[in-house]
Image (spheres, rainbow, N blue to C red):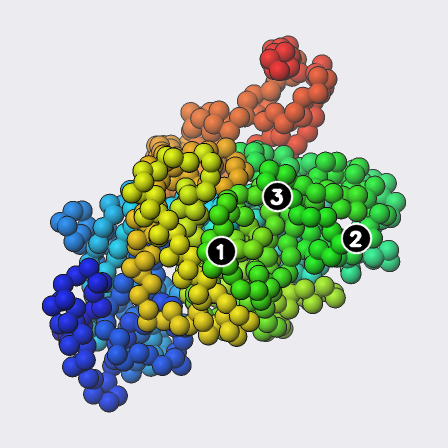
Amino acid sequence: MMMLQMNLPPRLSFHALFSALLFAALFIPRAGAQQIFTPDPAMHIRPNASWPRDRPLGVRLVSPRNSSATGAVVITGAQRPLPAQVGALQSATGGPAFPADLVTLRYGFEGMHPEPREGSTQVIWITTEVPPAAPPGNYRGEITVPGAGNVQVLLEVGDWVAPRPSRFVTNQSYIQSPHNIKRYYNVEHWSDEHFALLDASLTQLGRVGANVMYLPATGETHFGNRHTIVRYSGSPPNLQPDFSALERYLQMWDQRVGPPNFIILYMHERGRHTRTDTMKVTSAPRGGGGGGEQIEVPLYTEPQGPMLEAWRQTFAGIQQRVRALGWTETQVLLGIVGDNRDFADMRDFFEEAAPGMRWKTFTHGRGDPRVPTGDTGHVNMAGLDFAFITYPYNPRRGRPLPDSPPDGPGNWRNFFPFNTSHRQVFVHNTGDIETMTPFTWRYKAMASNTDRYNGFSRFGFDFIRTDDGLLMGRYHRWNNLTRDNTRHMVYPGPKGILSTQAVEMSREGNAMNQAYIVLHDALTLEEYEDKLPDNLRERVERVRNDTYARFQEHWQGSKDDLQNQLEKLVGQDWQTPLRELYDIAGEVSRSLGLDASPTGPVRRPAADGPEAPAAEAREWTSTDGRTVQAQFQGFANGQVGMMLPNGRTVSVPIESLSEADQDWVREATGLRLWRNPEGQGIYAKLLGFDGQTAQLENERGQSFELPLNALHPEEREYLRGMTSDE
């Protein structure tokens, strides 16, 4: 079997490097024979690309701990699908091997499929998922391609431990479309089949680090979500909200992505919601489950009557379910306001239906107050409080980046989320992710922290084109606001959304940006002043400046200029400086006691310390005596979430578990038995108590109220004790 050498890093001997280059130069395949290439991940990996014949063969991956790295092997002249194999990667120092089950091989140019694909030109993607406890160092192994040869793999694990992606400091606002997934795969909305497909989308969102969630509270928005995630029983205007679909979606997000910084309720749109319009929500089918038809309800500028109470229950119910998941610092906002602020006629409605809730806007900002900085969390415009602003402008808007990093704290230290949509940087009209060089995705987080921004917004994640066209922009004139946004970063597979080069490069770039933030904060924040040893501070400053200079050199000019500049990174040794960045970030984290905690404004209690440990596995017993080891993943809508040892998540009805396990779940999730004066009871969670009435939520997620005199004396004493403690 033919052995193909790789481009070994500069730290290896000159003899080894010379031998590798000589072997690669002498390897000249016969015309028409299968040929193997290992392109730089900085280039487009497309079937019609020109593969570099002068590049020595081998895959070099660089990753911090608790992150990932992806490379590619391309085979031309293939006669059949080519399955590949990879084993454990051996430590260069004789330490523990990097396990084979953390090395994934996937296939295909449009989406990374688990099985080999047809075609004369094929690509094999290799991704290493590096756990937080992996020893830093170099690991070597081989990818075996039957009939084609072996390709060497070098994995370099840096010293730094990255936080969970959703806890990265940079705001990352991707828009996931439940309705587009339903539409593409032709399943019933909010059905079991729909949620199985949504699980694949949320898994990829979790990998890139999404920390902003969008929920369709009204139907037919300009992003095209036809059906609402809160459905309603009854007949207008006497409607009662049904939260079952919302609860499943929130629980799935919690498992796959993690607590978001913000939840945007898609409630308002100028351009559709005019005085002559009605709004549309979705009905709850009798008997539960998926489905539901559209219902027309009065616009909120019209007299509401009983509908006002339905909206009050909707907004309060969403807030309650967010808090029940333990997302204590997640802000739930109303959105999305544009440039036109003539909405005095609806202000009174929202003050009554959603008291205290703030807003999100996508705007050019002309004539607006200055965006808050520092610890300020909101700004008042046109009589409404805004807590999230997105501008469409590119970072710097064509102005060159400064030659050096800022002397003071970075924009990510501002609490107020002020984001860019990267207009005309990523796509224009087509929405085609394949038009972008991969380093655009790698640098987008770092670019979002330049100038005045602290994140990016309005990246369409899974708005995949279907046979009848695009869903985004389908319903009304606000579609012009999607002209410069990505439609999708993923591709559809037979069983759900698949990762892409855009996703993998985004994931790696987000980790790179977070490591850069660790270094910059260590140099500029007063709390760290004089805490770094002088020799370490000098190295930190050099690596921070080198990282910035490489970014500043290539992120320049117009959209076309930018692409040309970034493509110059192909063939350069950008991996060695990246490894140095991760190693020095690890030193800084230990020196300052940062562990895996992010820097930046604190948005949730977990940001004050290291990543919370995963729930320990415990033995669960069913009512028929069967047992299984699994981690507890949460409880909602009567379903207990578990993660099995193989990583698969399942949900089981609580009544299918033994009495001891049911009691354990109830205690872990704050459920207790609430009895009436006769001693009959129901398990429920206390949502609130005003001194006279207890607001409760049962195991099925249904909320209700009980006056104090309807409760058993011991329950009354419990509530009075809570009040006196406060």
Answer yes or no: is residue 54 visible: yes
Q: Earlier in the sequence, mark 1 or mark 2?
A: 2
Would residue 70 be found to the left or right of residue 335 on screen?
Answer: left
Disc 2: which residue: 341
Q: State the image coordinates of residue 56 (x, y, percent, origin top left).
A: 23, 73
Marker disc for residue 445: 1
How far is disc 1 from disc 3 in space, using C-alphas? 19 Å
- Disc sitting over residue 373 in the figure: 3
Give residue 344's position: percent from left, percent from top.
Answer: 84, 47
Q: Nearer the viewer, mark 1 or mark 3?
A: 3
Q: Are marks 1 and 2 in contact (CB under 8 Å)?
A: no
Around disc 2, counting alpha carbons within 10 Å, would you say few (fewer than 14), some (14 to 19), or many (20 or more)?
few
Vertical placement of 272 versus 192: above or below? below
**Residue 488 falls left or right of residue 661:** right
Based on the displayed image, in which of its 4 quarters is residue 226 positioned?
bottom right
Residue under the image location 88 percent in, 45 percent down: 303
Q: First in sequence: mark 1 or mark 3?
A: 3
User: Hey, what amino acid is under mark 3?
Assistant: Thr
Residue 624 is at least partly visible in this image: no
Question: What quarter of the picture does the C terminus occupy?
Answer: top right
Q: Residue furthest left?
A: 15
Amino acid type at image mark 1: Ala
Q: Secondary structure at mark 1?
A: helix
Measuring 51% from the left and 29% from the top, which residue is drawn there? 669
Q: Amino acid at mark 2?
A: Arg
